Image: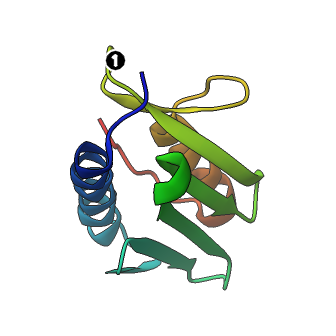
Amino acid sequence: MPLDEPTFERVAGEALARYAERLEAADGLDVELQGGVLTIETDAGKTFVLNKHAPLRQLWLSSPVSGASHYAFDAASGAWVATRGGAALAEVLARDLAEAAQVTVDFA
């Protein structure tokens, strides 16, 4: 069942804030969360962007490693999962950051 708009805004905002907090603690990353857009720049100049896409109630990730992907909230697991393939956003972002910046981030 799709999220209603207020629930989406709350859940997505909480997720972005949680990701930003964990990423800010990691070395080698410049992190900015503003207006529902989380921008992550590595010391090597690679940029990741994670943002809310309200019309579809999704989070969208642009990664220099895996490309673009879209994630919907799964209420049963409490996770954001890819609309294609079902991978968890936390796992994809952690894997891509490890590859792009040799940074380990635990989003659990």
Q: Quadrant of the N terminus?
A: top left
User: Residue 17, how many percent across, how many down?
Assistant: 25, 62
| Location of the C terminus (image quadrant) | top left
Q: Give the secondary structure at mark 1.
A: loop
Residue 97 appears anywhere in the view: no
Number of numbered discs: 1
How many C-alpha atoms fall within 10 Å of the one at disc 1: few (<14), some, or many (≥20)?
few
Residue 35 location (% of width, % of height): 35, 80
- Find residue 77 and report its image quarter: top left
Name the residue tied to disc 1.
77
The relative height of residue 88 versus residue 13 in the rendered view (above or below) is above
Q: Which residue: 57% across, 70% down?
A: 49
Q: What's the residue at 44%, 74% (across, down)?
A: 37
- Front residue (pair 54, 43): 54
Left or right of residue 45, residue 1 in this image? left
Residue 44 lies, with reference to residue 102, above or below; the image says below
Q: Quadrant of residue 61?
A: bottom right
Where is residue 47? Give x, y as percent.
Answer: 63, 77
**Residue 58 visible in image:** yes
Residue 27, quarter of the rendered image? bottom left
Disc 1 residue type? Ser
Residue at 76% in and 57% down: 65
For the view shown, which residue lies furthest in the top direction? 76
Residue at the image position 57 percent from the left and 83 percent from the top: 43
Relative placement, left or right, of 68 versus 29 is right
Q: Image check: 34 left or right of 59?
A: left
Q: Nearer the viewer, residue 45 or 27?
A: 45
